[in-house]
Image (cartoon, grey):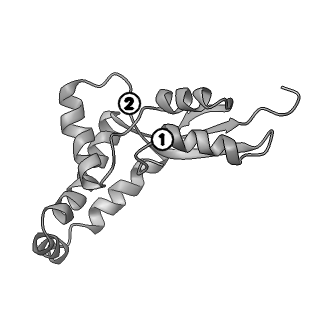
Amino acid sequence: MSHLPDKKLFFRNAVRLLKPDGKLVIADWFKADDLTTAQLEADIKPIEDGMLLPPLCTQSQYVQFAKDAALKIFSEPLDISQNVAKTWDISWSLVQSPALWAFAFSQGRDAIAFLQAFRAMRRGYANGTFRYAVMVFQKPGKHD
């Protein structure tokens, strides 16, 4: 979902498609709450830029979007950043190939930013500014 530019629209459409009592499970990247401008610039902006993302949301923003779309919280956001952070350590080690970087340089700015985003993700997880969470929402039933 982090790649979608209009997340509010996503939640509104999800409500239309879900059956009564139907559940929506979301696992996504998030920025932490209350980041400073320096943290946003150092950790989050390089991820958004390199991964071609619209501005990242916080977990609480997703919860509010869901509530605004008339979904109930079935399961509060569960931050699993520690469980997935190692993925980006492994990924960073894989993108260390000089040949890959040479290819990225031959492809231009976006390819370089993409590879640099791996380092930013590792830094964001380590700093707590970049998060990964799972949350579940439910469309109210006929008797709610």
Query: Which residue does the image show at 30% across and 54% down from the upper left?
Result: 52
Q: Residues within 10 Å of mark 2 (few under 14, many from 20)?
A: many
Asked if the residues shown at circle 2 and circle 1 are in contact, with their CB atoms under 8 angstroms apart, the answer is no
Q: Measure how far apart labels 2 and 1 are at the Cα level.
A: 17 Å
Mark 2 — residue?
Answer: 32
Mark 1 — residue?
Answer: 7
Which of the labelled discs sits on residue 123, or is there none? none
Residue 24 placement (x, y as % from top left): 66, 44
Kindly identify the amino acid type of the residue bearing the numbered disc 1.
Answer: Lys
Query: Which residue does the image show at 59% across and 32% down from the upper left?
Result: 66
**Is 96 left or right of 72, judged from the image as shown?**
left
Among numbered discs 2 and 1, the one appearing first in the sequence: 1
Q: Residues within 10 Å of mark 1 (few under 14, many from 20)?
A: some
Q: Quadrant of the C terminus?
A: top right
Residue 136 placement (x, y as % from top left): 65, 38
**Is 76 left or right of 7, judged from the image as shown?**
right
Under circle 1, the secondary element is helix
Residue 13 placement (x, y as % from top left): 61, 45
Query: Which residue does the image show at 13% across and 62% down from the upper left?
Result: 109
**Is 2 left or right of 111, judged from the image as shown?**
right
**Is 49 left or right of 72, judged from the image as shown?**
left
Kindly identify the amino acid type of the residue bearing the numbered disc 2.
Answer: Ala
From the image, state whether disc 2 or disc 1 is nearer to you.
Answer: 1
Residue 67 placement (x, y as % from top left): 61, 27
Res 102 → quadrant: bottom left
